[in-house]
Image (spheres, rainbow, N blue to C red):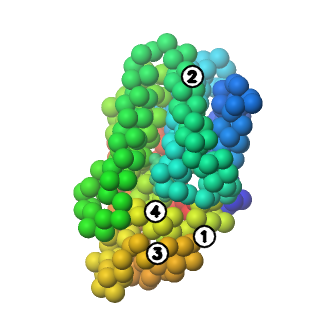
Amino acid sequence: VTGVAAEVQALVAAAGPHTPALLARLEERLVEIAGFTPALAQAAVATIRAGGKRLRPLLVLIAADLDGDGPAADGALRAATAVELIHSATLVHDDVLDGAALRRGQPTVVATGGRRMATATGDLLFARAFAEITLNEDPEQVRVLSRASTALARGELMQREDAWDAGVTVARYLERCELKTGRLFEAACELGALQSNGPRAKLAAFGLRIGLAFQLLDDVLDVEQPAERTGKTRGADLLDGTVTLPLILARERDQELAATPLREIADPAAAARFCERIEATGALEPVRARAHALVDDAKTILSGLPSRQAAALERVADGVVERRA
Ligand code: IPE
Ligand code: IPE
Ligand code: MG
Ligand code: MG
């Protein structure tokens, strides 16, 4: 996980000298707001404390084009906190839906506390996110966050609907990725823009594209990387029946692989073996290429933005496709 920290540090450095202090305030606020009722919120706070790349709040801060960490940054920081709380809520619920054992290198809330506890913890985090964003007293920011949350839920529902269906189309896969991941990245950029009266449409279009690329990469890493790197079980998507682009393309390339019923992949060892077979078809390359193309497209949108801001966003966009966790 040290490698991950280094990757993220490079992005933070690109976001300007005031950013580390802002991110430290973000951490404090996240714990404060998630743990406002400590006895009841242990799992929520543990989820926050387990870390994470904090990529979405970083995007809010960069999109807000701040020039310091003083009180003028308070609104952007609240929006950043709200976005990370929505993300954390989604992860806790996602692990229930996916039956996932590991998250951020630790047992998931559903694994330790059970389904009911995880459902309630995710609900708490969602509720706290909306409490935080209302403090900015801008109904448009609440609207942006609620639209993204709705998209997320629709994406997750779509994923359950399509579970175990190896015939799912690429178009439908991409729509799912846009809903469950792209839209929150888009919202992060929009919130920053709203906070600073920046070019909202431009930043939104940028966020949506890198968010989609982010999910494509997540699906590559699910096949490729061990838990020591990602903090998640390798082949988790296979184990919960989620058909991703690497699998779709691998099945086109390898008839034997295509003939294996997905439900036969029943435990982590079998999933890891199947991941090796997907990798061996070379199917990860076109998925990476697609993510790179999205990022290149996203970067073209940045022209006309202040140069320091554009450089920081470009760095994050590259980080999305270069990451290994
Ligand atoms: C994981 O997001 C969920 C996806 C949308 C793929 P991250 O990879 O940003 O998770 P953390 O916050 O760094 O743990
Ligand atoms: C991301 O999809 C879903 C969310 C928006 C939380 P995944 O199910 O692939 O995310 P991970 O891999 O569990 O983080
Ligand atoms: Mg998952
Ligand atoms: Mg995943």
Are the residues at dot 3 and dot 4 in contact (C-beta closer than 8 Å)? no
Q: Residue at x 60, y 70 (%)?
A: 226
Up-down: is 202 above or below 179?
above
**Amino acid marked by disc 1:** Pro
Q: With 98 as the anchor, is 7 left or right in this view?
A: right
Q: For numbered disc 3, what is the local secondary structure?
A: loop
Q: CA distance from mark 3 to mark 4?
A: 9 Å
Residue 240 numbered tag: 4
Up-down: is 55 above or below 41?
below
**Amino acid marked by disc 4:** Asp
Q: Residue at x 45, y 15 (%)?
A: 138
Which class describes the residues within 10 Å of circle 3: few (<14), some (14-19), or many (20+)?
Answer: some
Q: CA distance from mark 1 to mark 3?
A: 17 Å
Dot 4 beta carbon under 8 Å from ligand 3? yes
Of the numbered discs 4 and 1, the one sitting upstream in the chain is: 1
User: Which residue position is annotated with label 3?
Assistant: 265
Task: Kindly indicate the quadrant of the structure image that contains residue 169.
Answer: bottom left
Residue 226 numbered tag: 1
Up-down: is 189 above or below 76?
below
Q: Position of residue 40 (x, y in %)?
A: 70, 31
